[in-house]
Amino acid sequence: MRLLSLSILLLAAPGVEVVAYTLDQVEAQFSSYLKLAENGRLSTRGQLPLGCTLACDFLDFALPSQISYPNSTIYSLEESGYWSQQQALTEPTCRFSPKSALDVSFAVLALQVAQCAFAVKSGGHAAFEGASNIQGGMTIDLANLNEITVRSDRTQTAVGAGNIWYDVYTTLQPMGLTVIGGRVSAIGVGGLTLGGGISFFSGRYGWACDNVNNYEVVLADGSIRETAAAINDAFYYLGVNAPSDPYAQVITAYAYAQSVDTYIIASDLQYGKPVANPPILQNFTAVQGAIASTLRIVDQANLTIEFNNTNPGGFRQTYWTLMVGNNADLMADMVAIYMEEIEPLKTVAGIVPSLVFQPITTDMISHFSKNGGNALGLDDQGPLNLVQIDISWSDIADDNRILTAAQKILDGCQAAASAVGLLNKYVYQNYASAGQDVFSGYGQENLARLKAVSAKYDPAQVFQKLQPGYFKLN
Ligand SMILES: Cc1cc2nc3c(=O)[nH]c(=O)nc-3n(C[C@H](O)[C@H](O)[C@H](O)COP(=O)(O)OP(=O)(O)OC[C@H]3O[C@@H](n4cnc5c(N)ncnc54)[C@H](O)[C@@H]3O)c2cc1C
Ligand SMILES: *[C@@H]1O[C@H](CO)[C@@H](O)[C@H](O)[C@H]1NC(C)=O
Ligand SMILES: *[C@@H]1O[C@H](CO)[C@@H](O)[C@H](O)[C@H]1NC(C)=O
Ligand SMILES: *[C@@H]1O[C@H](CO)[C@@H](O)[C@H](O)[C@H]1NC(C)=O
Ligand SMILES: *[C@@H]1O[C@H](CO)[C@@H](O)[C@H](O)[C@H]1NC(C)=O
């Protein structure tokens, strides 16, 4: 399987400018539209207050068949495309599905003219409310930006930002090609690459964001502490020994299984080439007991389907994260903190609480400096342990208890890591909760650079102010 690099159509990332409309042109079209509408020559959906109703109606007029309204089949289908219930229950005034970068450019200007707040959705897997959907606003759904074109020399592929990784992999697989992308079939190309992007091959090639050549950009103007010790040790030694074999990757998850009222440990053992029981992973496979292991030879597309099946949509979800040094004792301390907070929540309807560890190896980090370097600020560190607190549940009435517990687990883990000098300031955007400060972890210099890029390419700060969801530079 050959790996290629990506070229992705995005909104709001620094890169190449699209030839597009001007604000004046869109303003002129908007006022002509208003006159037509006022003269009754257009059928409108009732009154025209400034804001999102107007922005929706105008776009529906200017770019027919790309706007959907609540209670329509398309709107309902698109709303069901979010992973978390919080996002699926969020109702924008309308949803806009652009067919090209030019459509996106037009819409971003129209949103400014009408002062309508908006959100942007790729794969819809960001967990918290407002990340890629917006109550009462306009959601730009990128699903139709789904081109996948391999360049004739087979070294690059252009991928529309509305694609999910499964479609990318299954298109490339018959050609003997693949890319550095997500590990769950239904994750979107847009969000994963913008936040970082840990792939099955990251030990050898870095994160997805390190393998993007260029973006086409639209500007704005548990009983666990026994087998557990062996697992934690295996995890620690994988971080240490990874440079001897970068094909190996592991996800170790501690979870509470309500149906059997017990804590379990699951290790997803991944090996980036078809070898049975590779030595680098044998400390894991040697551990006997209540361990679910997934080690066997599968193809990448099917593996992402399997991972998708273990992460069903439709539940309430929350993700939190921290980065710590590689240390087995600290892992045991964090598991104890997690279990203490989960104990009183064991009877919450549908609860699946997990504490997940992933080694961030020195090999992975070494790739961060290729292609000009990435802005994440993790260079020259490692091996590290990327910790994720990940809870799903059924009932909205339990939100406060769960979120309070998640915050306490985070605070407790941070304090435990600080106490032994192993807390890293980096906060992985793709696993962060809404209130976590992602960008300061990138470091002063990177943050200043991102702010300068934002000031230069988005002087009116449209993407910082009019698109309120998700993480902001200021
Ligand atoms: C079950 C599951 C498995 C996961 N597995 C992995 C994994 O293997 N590796 C990994 O690194 N991460 C993983 N993650 C984290 C994942 O990368 C993030 O949740 C990511 O943000 C999802 O991207 P998306 O496009 O599906 O989400 P969306 O919710 O559509 O987008 C996330 C954010 O990016 C913005 N955005 C998306 N596209 C664009 C664009 N073109 N222009 C401007 N803004 C855009 C959205 O507005 C939103 O704010 C996983 C998450 C889940 C829920
Ligand atoms: C959608 O339909 C429901 C029930 O049929 C109704 O209560 C609601 O007002 C409708 N929403 C819109 C925006 O038309
Ligand atoms: C397996 O664990 C032992 C310690 O128990 C360690 O010395 C060895 O390096 C580990 N092997 C790998 C491949 O991680
Ligand atoms: C995936 O699994 C299916 C059925 O288990 C199999 O038929 C198929 O060949 C596998 N590979 C791909 C690429 O789908
Ligand atoms: C992912 O799983 C959901 C069920 O939670 C399913 O509806 C969806 O079709 C799956 N998508 C892919 C691409 O496997």
Image: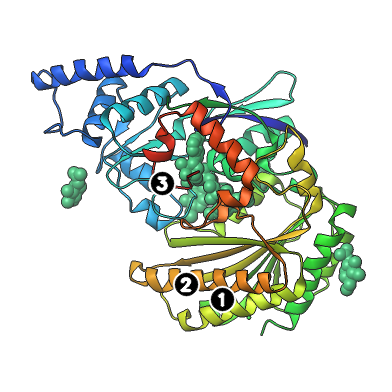
Element assignment for label 2: loop
For the residue pair 4 and 22, the one nearer the viewer reads as 22
For the residues labelled 1 and 3, the Cα–Cα distance comes to: 31 Å
Q: Say what amino acid the circle numbered 1 marks.
A: Tyr
Left or right position of 66 against 224: left
Label 3 belongs to which residue? 469
Q: Earlier in the sequence, mark 2 or mark 3?
A: 2
Asked whether mark 2 and ligand 1 are closer than 8 Å, the reply comes as no
Q: Earlier in the sequence, mark 1 or mark 3?
A: 1
Judge the density around disc 2: few (<14), some (14-19), many (≥20) Cα neighbours within 10 Å. Answer: many
Residue at image x 78%, y 58%? Answer: 383
For the residues labelled 2 and 1, the Cα–Cα distance comes to: 8 Å
Asked whether mark 3 and ligand 1 are closer than 8 Å, the reply comes as yes
Element assignment for label 1: strand
Residue at image x 35%, y 25%? Answer: 109
Q: Is residue 152 placed above or below 141 in the rendered structure? A: above
The residue at the far left in this view is: 39
Label 1 belongs to which residue? 256
Kindly tell me whether residue 340 is visible in this rendering: yes
For the residue pair 82 and 334, the one nearer the viewer reads as 334
Judge the density around disc 1: few (<14), some (14-19), many (≥20) Cα neighbours within 10 Å. Answer: many
